[in-house]
Amino acid sequence: MFQVSREFAPPFSLISPFFTVGSLLYLVAMLLLPTFGADSVRYDISVVAWAHLFLLGFVMMIIFGAMAQLVPVVLEVGHFSVDFYYLIWPLLAVGTAFMAVGFAFLPSLLPFGGLMVLVSMLIFLADTILTLKKVERISLTVKTIAVTNAFLLLGILIGFAMSLAIGAGVGVDIEKWLGAHIVMVLGGYVTLTIVGMSMVLLPMFGLSHGFDETPVNRAFKIMSAGVAAYFLGALLDSDSIRFLSLIALFIGTGLYLWQIWLIYKTRARKESDIWFKSMVVGYGSLAIALILAPIALIGRLETLALTATWFLVMGFFTFLINGHLYKIVPFLVWFERYSPLVGKRKVPMLADMVPKKAAEFQFWFTAAGLVTAGVGLLFGSDELFKGGAAFMATGAVFMFYSIRWMINFTEGLED
Ligand code: HEM
């Protein structure tokens, strides 16, 4: 499917800023990470500032760039208006910076940053919805994109309402809505989008086929129901609905991991390149988070909950995203610069377009940092947390270097 419909793909110059800015803000967030300690509580406002810098500036930025490319490819129709994307990344980048500064130092700046982020996301959502309307066959992928985008819209509207409460004194009960905001954006958008995209990307890069897709279909339904139920739980202020919805999210995640195992077992490409190793750490982290989170929920153990969140966000999200960049960026660069030359002169292989040493350093520093800092959080050790965070910051330097190296790849074009 990926090969058939590349004609709808937008130009690389439109997508590359998402990857450059995303990896730059990732680097900034990682450089700031060692300033926190193992005792930083989730509700500390500097943690909230950092969380948005990381989640909006890196996670959402890269997802939006990837979606600019993948939505038309998967749906087999062109974007409603691809030019929208020239607005999305600057608004998201500046809005994120304002939000981070607003949270940390200047609450009155927060609604402005929030509004810019909101507008950039509304543009993204408008393009996606108008693109979906052009699709004639309503497949599961179409439904997936529609559902996740609806969750994103609700999640950011709640976020914006909360930012008005902090920055402008509007009467919104943050305690009541914070959980719903987190579950809608992290569960309903980021995780479910990764679930949907991974079903296209993993079989393609690992050359898997002929596997049963029942687990992921069930996982998607159960997780969507869980996210929707959490929203209802917040609306009705019901602890039992919130509890049950989290259980549904855990069951859905378990089914998704089972699906990943089925894909892994049928893969034909056996080499363990940087992408494959990143997937192992990413899904391993998701499994760790899934073991810790239910214990934390039932035992009401705050430290365990924080450690589970750490592995979900810094292990699963980060390694899935960074790992895929080593496949997606070379592919896009190759398609843009070398595909017109096929048959006329020697063109590089995709594997030659990855800076292998820098990628290895990135992987090992980040993985070592992830585990060290995760153990530090679990046992409340500042030294371990800060040491791990410094490792992750070093990994991020190599990540930024690798992204720029891949984007600037022009070998063999000059002569
Ligand atoms: C228009 C966009 C957004 C706005 C205005 C916004 C605003 C807010 C506000 C006001 C809070 C509450 C802070 C507090 O506890 O006092 C919050 C918390 C949070 N938001 Fe957002 N948000 C937005 C988008 C997002 C997105 C897209 C994500 C994830 C991808 C996200 C993840 C989180 C998380 C994880 C927390 C909890 C942080 C913590 O407790 O440490 N937000 N957000």
Image (cartoon, rainbow, N blue to C red):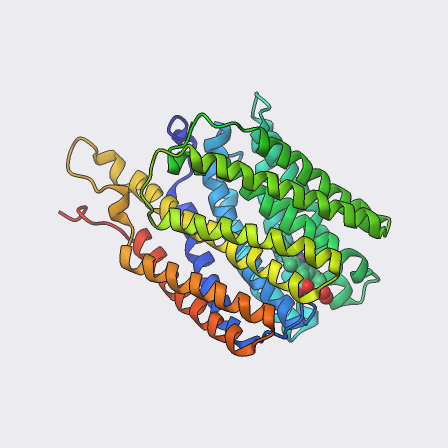
Ligand 1 image position (quadrant): bottom right
Q: Residue at x 31, y 43 (%)?
A: 271
400 on left or right of 303: left
Quadrant hosting residue 163 = bottom right
Note whether 409 is above or below 39 in the view shown: above
x and y, in percent, of residue 379 in the image: 59, 71
Quadrant hosting residue 1 = top left
Q: Residue at x 53, y 34 (%)?
A: 80
- Of 415 and 323, which appears nearest the observer? 323
x and y, in percent, of residue 88 in the image: 53, 50
x and y, in percent, of residue 251 in the image: 66, 42
Q: Residue furthest left?
A: 415
Q: Residue at x 49, y 68 (%)?
A: 372
Q: Residue at x 39, y 50 (%)?
A: 277
x and y, in percent, of residue 389 in the image: 49, 70
- Of 345 and 178, which appears nearest the observer? 178
